[in-house]
Amino acid sequence: MKNTFFISASDWTVDQTTASCALLAQANAAGLLSLALKPVAIGAKPCGDDLRSRDALRLQQAMSGDLDYEQVNPYPFSDCNSPNLAAARAGKNISASRLAGYCRGALYGRYDFALIEGVGAWGELLNPRERLAKLALELKLPVILVVGLNPGCISQALLSAGAIAADGLKLAGWVAQPGEAAGAAADGLFDCLTEQMRAPCLGRLNEQGSELDIAALGLPKA
């Protein structure tokens, strides 16, 4: 799946969808046809007879391509819990191979840039036997890690990067996001991460949604 990336986060406090939308905005501005999927979403709200995830709706609005909601988010859950617990409470049995099939179907055809967004951190469980990260492994996707500038984020980011590498996948880049640290403390965390992470920094978000640099991802020219 060329020019497709899996989005993960260093911890549960990180709003990875904001980073995904910023990446999609940059792809759109470059004239690229962009698509985004959120195969599993938690915290979904009732919408008629269905459930809709705010994050999945944000991705659907941010991408320049056209996908139905059910293609973007085939598994919305109302629980705000780990995917395996949310699925179990809803009586659903989902697997990485099934999700991979949904993703291949939704991304069948022409596009220049696509994101598949996970839930929470790299180690989240999808079911009692599989981690959600197995979806990225099934699809052999490079990973973009979103890191919140919080106390402890250096350890969390480095551990996440190590786990991604141990799983045999490439860390294509990382994005810094505002967190609990502010001012000089946030700057210090960002500078340290920039030195320690073995992947390019695609940018640092702020409240205004700073532009990200997606050139390091090696995307095609429009």
Image (cartoon, rainbow, N blue to C red):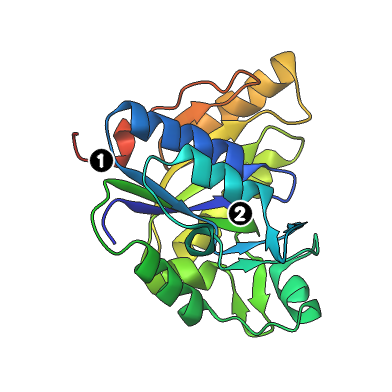
Q: Image check: 108 left or right of 116?
A: left
> In the drawing, what numbered circle is on residue 218?
1
The quadrant the N terminus occupies is bottom left
**Callout 2: SS:** helix
Q: On the rendered image, what quadrant is the C terminus found in?
A: top left
Direction from residue 195 to residue 185 in the image, left or right: right
Relative vertical location of residue 90 with respect to residue 156 in this rendering, above or below: below
- Residue 72 visible, this orientation: yes
When asked about the image quadrant of residue 136, the answer is: bottom left
Position of residue 162 relative to residue 77, above or below, is above
Residue, disc 2 = 159
Where's residue 110, x and y in %? 23, 54
- The image shows residue 101 at horizontal and vertical percentages of 41, 76
Instruction: Kindly identify the residue that appears in the image at 35 percent across and 44 percent down.
Output: 34
Could you tell me residue 197's position as x and y percent?
A: 49, 40
* Secondary structure beneath label 1: loop
Q: Position of residue 53 (x, y in %)?
A: 67, 54
